[in-house]
Amino acid sequence: MITVTVIKSPKVECKNCHEAHRVVEDAIKEFPNEVSVEVLISNTPEAQAYGIISTPLVAINKKIYSMGKPVIKDHVQSWIKKELGK
């Protein structure tokens, strides 16, 4: 099982953060029982451990794949396949 972490801004109006979370949730549907999602808020110690500079951040098994830009479903699925060795 791998974990996809989405780090969001604490600001409610961060549309890219909400969209990144939605895209990740949609992307993992292709990998039932292989992937879990963890959502962190950027001002928490757990999120700060990633060295976050901007949100949204998407990491898989603590490896950062995207930071500060919109997330694309096909890319997320590709990253997951890479981490799963598929």
Image (tube, helix red, strand yellow):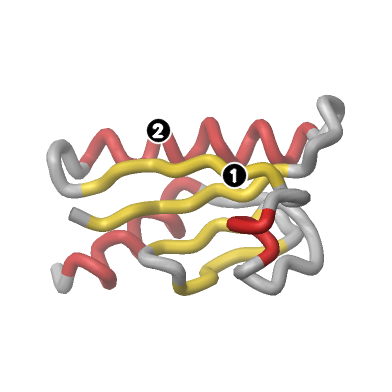
Residue 1 lies in quadrant: bottom left
Position of residue 32 measured from the top left corner of the image (x, y, whole percent): 16, 37
Q: Earlier in the sequence, mark 1 or mark 2?
A: 2
Label 1: how many Cα within 10 Å (few below 14, some 14–19, many 20+)? some
Q: Residue furthest front?
A: 45
Count of marks placed on residues: 2
Q: Which label lies toward us, 1 or 2? A: 1
> Which is nearer the eye, 61 or 27?
61
| Residue at horizontal 27 percent and vertical 34 percent from the top | 29
Type of amino acid at the residue the image marks with label 1: Leu
Type of amino acid at the residue the image marks with label 2: Asp
Q: Which residue in the protein does label 1 denote? A: 40
Name the quarter where the C terminus is drawn. Answer: bottom left
Mark carried by residue 26: 2
| Residue at horizontal 77 percent and vertical 50 percent from the top | 43
Label 2: how many Cα within 10 Å (few below 14, some 14–19, many 20+)? few
Position of residue 74 measured from the top left corner of the image (x, y, whole percent): 42, 52
13 with respect to 62 (left or right): right
Position of residue 80 measured from the top left corner of the image (x, y, whole percent): 31, 60
> Which is nearer the eye, 44 or 42?
44
31 with respect to 13 (left or right): left
38 with respect to 77 (left or right): right
Q: What element carries label 2?
A: helix
The reply to whether the C-beta atoms of the residues labelled 1 and 2 are less than 8 Å apart is no
